[in-house]
């Protein structure tokens, strides 16, 4: 079969929470001022109560509200495809599958968490939510969700992507979102950055600072985060839960699962339901590979330490692999992967050796995206193309070894708003960026000084 389809009745009724199955407990998030473990009360100015409860929940399974499942039905369950044409192009004995999240109205996996986050805010009577966005996929998803539940949405979009992808801004505005290039003059955090660097291309860390500052300044406003924190990862597990059932239909199970990593939500959403089998001993032998940009190599070159999720240091300190909250990634076209840190759950699993990490440059990623488009027909986002690059590497390794291998990768979003990037690649103008080690060292030298902690 080419594609494996579930019915709406087969859609998951619960999200999977990996916290109870981790090989060891996470270190707690810390208050940005006191550096003491953060409490639910500390998060109440920023997040709705039910999201806070999910952030700390010890329950393995958390029910998906009926109102959220009703919206999910617009595009879920999403299809699983067999990339047989790519297999032939690569002349590999490997079987390649991809989970296709681009069928959502926003064109990516992001509505999987945008919908429940906005729903919980609306149920609590919140009038407006603020957020950051890199390439615009998250901002689009939140604007879409806001339009369904009557919640206003304000988006701070990284300036490099704001300029590269104007139609993402148009999409957000079509759904009623208001969008500002970040750094902006609307917040003190933005004004401070512009005073130091008037030409700043922005970063996700800066955009988070602006969105958090905006939310804290208004009693009727909350903040919605697009990645990294536990509740975001939780909501995304619908991806992997569906993929497991679809692979059962195919009579298969992956030898390797691959996803792209910016903050870790898409990657974790696909892999964690499979990692559950490894962690509980139900399965063994599956490898998990995280593919990230060489221009922002958090897992491959970052430090495992406490750091702020935002440039201004307004958010809770997270124990994660980080390049430093002041790190300014080059303006690559995979704007959704330009985040200086990763989800603490993912970072713990990487540190424990359960997740591998690889880093790729822009040109090799776009090379594979074009080959995929010519073989399978789909044009994928630069972010997803990192996962594809990893999948091709695994397929070619299987060919070299002369062995069968089942590969699953995440197709997290389409590239229909990224054609300017493809123009640059096809014209030979796309740049690769190698981050100098002295820049990494300088950024890591500014990490907050937190005494060693135990759980």
Image (cartoon, rainbow, N blue to C red):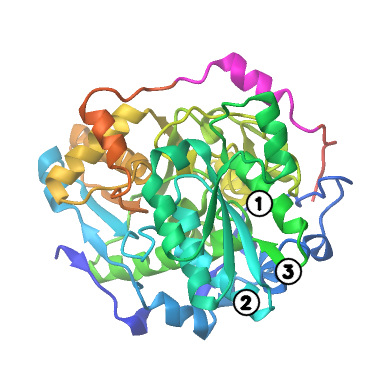
**Which of the 4 image quarters holds residue 443?**
top right
SS label for mark 2: helix
Query: Which region of the structure is painted magenta?
Result: 434-448
Q: Which mark is residue 122?
A: 2
Measuring from the top left, give residue 287's x and y in whole percent: 41, 46
**In this view, which residue lies farthest toward the right?**
34
Report if residue 446 lies within the magenta region: yes
Classed neighbour count for the residue bearing mark 3: other residues with Cα under 10 Å, few (<14), some (14–19), many (≥20): few
Label whose residue precedes the other's in the sequence (2 or 3): 2
Marks 2/3 in contact by CB < 8 Å: the verdict is no
Label whose residue precedes the other's in the sequence (3 or 1): 1
Measuring from the top left, give residue 141's x and y in whole percent: 46, 61
SS label for mark 1: helix
Label whose residue precedes the other's in the sequence (1 or 2): 2
176 to 64, vertically: above or below: above
Marks 3/1 in contact by CB < 8 Å: the verdict is no
Q: Residue at x 22, y 34 (%)?
A: 401
**Which of the 4 image quarters holds residue 161?**
top left
Label 2, label 3: how far apart the Cα atoms are:
11 Å
Instruction: State the residue in front, 135 or 363.
Output: 135
In this image, 141 relative to 30: left or right?
Answer: left
SS label for mark 3: loop
**Which of the 4 image quarters holds residue 441?**
top right
Q: Residue at x 39, y 36 (%)?
A: 333
- The residue that label 1 is drawn on is 211
Measuring from the top left, give residue 70's x and y in whole percent: 44, 82
Label 3, label 1: how far apart the Cα atoms are:
14 Å
Q: Quadrant of the N terminus?
A: bottom left
Classed neighbour count for the residue bearing mark 2: other residues with Cα under 10 Å, few (<14), some (14–19), many (≥20): some
- The residue that label 3 is drawn on is 220
């Amino acid at each position: 079969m080419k594609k494996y389809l579930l019915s709406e009745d087969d859609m998951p009724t619960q999200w999977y929470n990996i916290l109870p199955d981790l090989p060891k407990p996470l270190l707690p998030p810390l208050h940005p001022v006191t550096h003491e473990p953060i409490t639910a009360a500390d998060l109440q100015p920023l997040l709705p109560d039910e999201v806070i409860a999910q952030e700390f929940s010890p329950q393995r399974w958390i029910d998906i509200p009926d109102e959220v499942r009703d919206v999910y039905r617009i595009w879920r369950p999403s299809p699983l495809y067999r990339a047989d044409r790519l297999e032939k192009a690569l002349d590999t004995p490997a079987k390649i599958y991809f989970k296709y999240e681009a069928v959502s109205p926003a064109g990516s996996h992001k509505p999987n968490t945008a919908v429940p986050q906005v729903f919980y805010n609306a149920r609590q009577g919140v009038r407006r939510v603020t957020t950051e966005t890199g390439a615009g996929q998250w901002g689009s998803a939140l604007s879409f969700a806001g339009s369904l539940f009557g919640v206003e949405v304000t988006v701070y979009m990284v300036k490099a992507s704001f300029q590269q992808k104007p139609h993402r801004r148009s999409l957000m505005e079509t759904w009623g979102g208001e969008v500002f290039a970040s750094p902006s003059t609307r917040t003190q955090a933005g004004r401070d950055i512009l005073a130091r660097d008037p030409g700043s291309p922005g970063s996700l860390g800066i955009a988070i600072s602006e969105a958090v500052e905006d939310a804290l300044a208004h009693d009727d406003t909350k903040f919605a985060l697009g990645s990294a924190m536990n509740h975001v990862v939780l909501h995304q597990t619908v991806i992997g839960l569906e993929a497991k059932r679809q692979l059962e239909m195919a009579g298969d199970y992956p030898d390797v699962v691959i996803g792209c990593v910016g903050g870790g939500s898409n990657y974790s959403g696909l892999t964690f339901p499979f990692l559950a089998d490894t962690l509980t001993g139900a399965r063994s032998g599956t490898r998990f590979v995280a593919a990230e940009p060489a221009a922002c190599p958090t897992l491959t070159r970052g430090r495992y330490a406490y750091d702020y999720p935002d440039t201004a240091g307004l958010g809770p300190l997270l124990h994660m692999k980080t390049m430093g909250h002041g790190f300014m990634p080059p303006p690559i076209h995979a704007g959704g992967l330009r985040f200086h840190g990763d989800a603490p759950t993912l970072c713990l699993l990487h540190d424990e050796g359960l997740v591998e990490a690889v880093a790729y440059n822009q040109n090799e990623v776009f090379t594979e995206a074009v080959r995929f488009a010519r073989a399978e027909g789909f044009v994928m986002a630069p972010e997803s193309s990192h996962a594809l690059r990893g999948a091709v590497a695994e397929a070619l390794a299987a060919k070299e070894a002369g062995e069968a291998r089942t590969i699953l990768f995440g197709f997290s979003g389409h590239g229909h708003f990224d054609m300017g990037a493809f123009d640059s690649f096809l014209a030979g103008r796309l740049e690769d960026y190698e981050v100098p080690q002295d820049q990494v060292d300088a950024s890591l030298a500014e990490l907050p000084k937190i005494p060693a902690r135990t759980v």
